[in-house]
Image (cartoon, grey):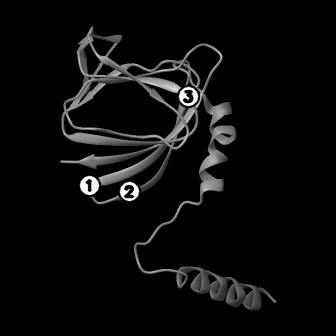
Amino acid sequence: MKQIAILVLSALLLAGSAAGPSGFVQWRSSELKAYAKKLSPKINEQKFAMDQLGVFGKHSVVIVHREGTGEAEVHENMADLFVVQQGAATLVVGGKVVGAKQTQPGEIRGKSIQGGEKRPLGPGDMAYIPANLPHQVQVPAGKQITYVIVKLEK
């Protein structure tokens, strides 16, 4: 009986892996929308939670859920491509990071951005943030946003 179960499980795994070309990954809209509920209980003191969806060489995909304003950020060696799934926020881009400090190699964080441009974000919106451009996601009290980030290393 145990051998039959192992054979059936192996056949199912092989059938599942044959479903697409090698390296192909697809995230269904319904799966991405479900992340707001999945990540909300994991919110930390910065009102932020995320899950890694995949790593592809120098690039990666993460999904982020925020229920408050994040830190100002600068990625020296990486661009971000945001794809908003649900909720709303304001993306501040450009300007200067207030209280800038290097938190790890190639990563700068700070309290806020001075002199940046404010851009509204909502469901279906996309935003490309090149390397070295200060940015901050501002979420009003009582609101939330869930978005995918494709991180593109230079």
Residue 88 numbered tag: 3
User: In the displayed structure, would residue 63 be above or below residue 41?
Assistant: below
Q: Residue at x 51, y 65 (%)?
A: 26
Seen from this angle, which residue lies furthest right? 1
Residue occupying the point 60% across, 13% down: 141
Are the residues flagged by discs 2 and 1 in contact, CB closer than 8 Å? no
Label 2 to label 1: alpha-carbon separation: 8 Å
Q: Secondary structure at mark 1?
A: loop
Quadrant of the frame with the N terminus: bottom right
Which quadrant of the figure has residue 36? top right
Query: Residue 55 — which label?
Result: 2
Q: Which residue is mark 1?
A: 58
Residue 36 disc label: none
Of pointers 2 and 3, the one earlier in the residue sequence: 2
Q: Amino acid at mark 1?
A: Lys
Residue at figure coordinates x 69%, y 85% from the top left:
6
Identity, as a three-letter code, of the amino acid under mark 3: Ala
**CA–CA distance between discs 1 and 3?**
29 Å
